[in-house]
Amino acid sequence: MSSEHYFSETPDTEYKPKKIQAVLAGQSVELTTAGGVFSPDHVDQGTAVLLEHLAHAPAGGNILDIGCGWGPIALSLAIQSPRATVWAIDINSRSRELTELNAKKLGLNNVRVCAPENVPADLAFTGIWSNPPIRVGKDALHEIMQTWLPRLAPDAEAYLVVQKNLGADSLHRWLEAKLPSGFSTIRVDTAKSFRVLRVKNRNG
């Protein structure tokens, strides 16, 4: 990947869309990706590990995908929970464009794609799912976590996947120390060098 990274707001890489095959929520689908976004050639291993827990997604309400890329998590959530509204956010405009394109192609009218700043400020989430952008750096990552995780509705859960050698355990400790009172963080899975963390708002 070029030095611009996938978290650039406007990728410099020429837009060259391509088709890939993927299995999302048990369905084999054809999707469009392109360079300048995260893992454009396939569903990355961390996301695949996270999606093994898809059965825990809430059936309704508003679910958030932080850093949607070309859409594998948001699309899977939308298929799994057709009565929910899935908010797919990404700072990368190309990622948003691809997720919107793929949602439309799959007929998933319950996906809302937008920049992070355009999510309604009063929205609480029945679930948050993310393969967070660890490589943005610790300070930026912590800011992302502190912005969104406190917006979990009472008794709602967030599922995060983080590679062990990229600081999964230190992030776990930080979440336990820094999230508001009543929030808990546990490790629910370790697979293929990844940790899956579950954050729950136990208030209410």
Image: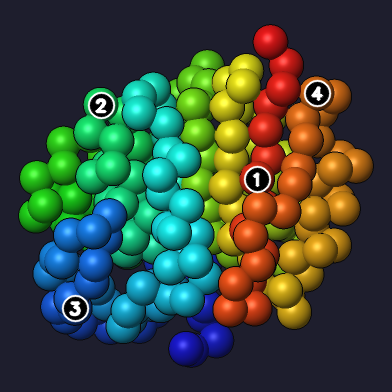
Q: Considering only vertical position in the picture, is 65 above or below 189?
A: above
| Mark number, residue 182 | 4
Q: Position of residue 166 (x, y in %)?
A: 73, 75
Q: In front: 201, or 12?
A: 201
Kind of residue at badge 4: Gly
Q: Which residue does the image show at 50% across and 59% down from the upper left?
A: 50
> Which tag, 2 or 3, sits closer to the chain's start?
3
How far apart, in angstroms, are the residues tagged by discs 2 and 4? Answer: 28 Å
Kind of residue at badge 3: Ile
Q: In front: 13, or 77?
A: 77
**Residue marked by disc 3:** 20
> Which tag, 4 or 1, sits closer to the chain's start?
4
In the displayed image of the protein, which residue is found farthest to the bottom?
2
Question: Circle 3 sits in a helix, a strand or a loop, which is it?
Answer: strand
In the displayed image of the protein, which residue is found farthest to the right?
177
- Graded by Cα atoms within 10 Å as few (under 14), some (14 to 19) or many (20 or more), the crowding at tag 3 reads some
Q: Position of residue 163 (x, y in %)?
A: 66, 73
Kind of residue at badge 2: Arg
2 and 1 marks in contact (CB < 8 Å): no
- Graded by Cα atoms within 10 Å as few (under 14), some (14 to 19) or many (20 or more), the crowding at tag 2 reads some
2 and 3 marks in contact (CB < 8 Å): no
How far apart, in angstroms, are the residues tagged by discs 3 and 4? Answer: 42 Å
| Mark number, residue 198 | 1
**Residue marked by disc 2:** 83
